[in-house]
Amino acid sequence: MGIDIGQILLELWNSSGFAYIFANLSEVGWQNIVMIAISCVLLYFGIVKQFEPLLLVGIAFGCLLSNLPLGGLYHPELWEAFMDETSSAYHSYGAILREGGLLDFFYIGVKTSIYPCIIFMGVGAMSDFGPLLSNPKSLLLGAAAQLGVFAAFFGAVCLGFTGPEAASIGIIGGADGPTAIFLTSRLAPHLLGAIAVAAYSYMALIPMIQPPFMNLLTTPEQRKIKMVQTRAVSKAERIVFPIVVTIFCALLLPDTTPLIGSLMLGNLFRECGVTERLSDTAQNALMNIVTIMLSTSVGATMVGSTFLTGSTLKIVLLGVCAFILSTVGGLLGGQVMCLLTGGKVNPLIGSAGVSAVPMAARVSNKEGQKANPSNFLLMHALGPNVAGVIGSAIAAGFLLSVFG
Amino acid sequence: MLLSNTISTELSLLDAGIIALLGYAVVFFGLILLMLVVMIMSKAFTTRKSENPGKTEQPPAPSAPVSVPASAPAPVPAPAAGQPAPGSAGQLKLHDVPPKTAAMLMAIVAHKTGKPLNELRFISIKEVK
């Protein structure tokens, strides 16, 4: 009996992704094609334009992998069953491990909130809270800059989103990727891809989004204000700070404990002086490994059926509004501080309260230098900047308390 | 899960507005309390230090959070513990030197001499051609 080469080639064709796309072009095939195109555009932004490349490249490639049909790397239907109370696979990680693909396994870390917390630990290990400790009033700017979170939340409800969805969209205004992923994976996992992409894209666009509003809401004289050097912070203060903040925040809003606890643990590794190896691991190797798994699995959630909807467009729109309003809130806070201190505070540092460490602080420094080349606001802007991280975590904790 | 049992997922605009205002207030409240805690903590450490002037602490190594960009000035060494930095003294004249380069040079000098930047006075920086 001879080999039927024609039959083999036909079966090979029928089992290919090309055949699947063409056979289902009117149903899901076109969605696959559009999503593949979108992932290529995101790869372009990540690689060529260097918009948050460490995350955007992974997100875009995860999106590409999950939209290539029949690859079996990610199974949205498994996660739908995971969330379906009537399904036998409801909240069953065993079912995911048994039937899932590589990106499903990675996604377990998102679902269990492990990745955002580990990333926060790395952020804590990289962050210097000295500027905040030397000027605790900068915490107020971190609070003022959360305006966009709650304004976008309200806007999302106006546009017809449910409470948990609106809360997840609003947190984009916190300009804090891990917090956005943490909250969305708990409240509105079906929006995770769109929200993560919006959050990271806008974070990358901060140097373009913020300056027009910084110039609009400050006068040239205010932008020229030079701030005096802040006091030196002792080592003991730096060590006690993360412990105190953890106890305080965990008691005030227990839902913030995973994020604040991880952030402060990372910072304690950095400051205590006896765990240098752990600090190094948290801010380098561990963070890099988790970034790979987080970005690819978040990207994988961008499947056509859930991403190519009117909701995504609304999220993109609300996300940019949230960023702008957070910037405005921070700048208004800066104006108030400038007024109350008799012009000793440069209001430009207020916009750094939107978290996004250290990009927002760099933008404040750059705009200050445009007005006065000998003005160095970087260290002053870092206070509100790290305060914004704590502020957005508290905002997320509040929203989780209400809708979780 | 503070209010999840009482708040339905379909919110009215009034409810959404109240939650938004309440949330913003909670963030302010939390960070104001934290500010007070940090202030009290700083006060306690400053008082303790002034009571034990003999026990001088090594000033912490200057560090910038995450990565400081190439365009940013080099980290400025912190002044000795307990001594408030007075800020810049006088005017620095720059001759054909961009401010960024000047800031970098001053930071290097401070680092190499082991003296805090606020204890050094730079009168002018000129590029030797």
Image (cartoon, coloured by chain):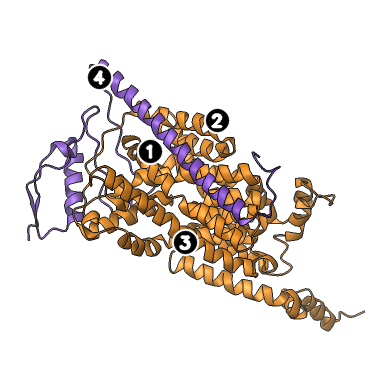
Q: Earlier in the sequence, mark 1 or mark 3?
A: 1
The amino acid type of the residue labelled 2 equals: Leu
Q: Given the image, what chain letter belongs to the residue carrying mark 1?
A: A
Is residue A24 in sight in this rendering?
Answer: yes
The amino acid type of the residue labelled 3 equals: Tyr
Q: Secondary structure at mark 4?
A: helix
How much space separates mark 4 and mark 1, taking CA atoms?
Answer: 23 Å
Q: Position of residue A288 (x, y in %)?
A: 51, 49
**Mark 1 touches mark 3? (CB < 8 Å):** no
Figure check: B119 above or below A291: above
The amino acid type of the residue labelled 1 equals: Phe
Residue A91, which numbered label? Answer: none
Q: Which residue is mark 1?
A: A129
Report whether B18 appears left or right of A216: right
Q: Secondary structure at mark 2?
A: helix
The amino acid type of the residue labelled 4 equals: Ser
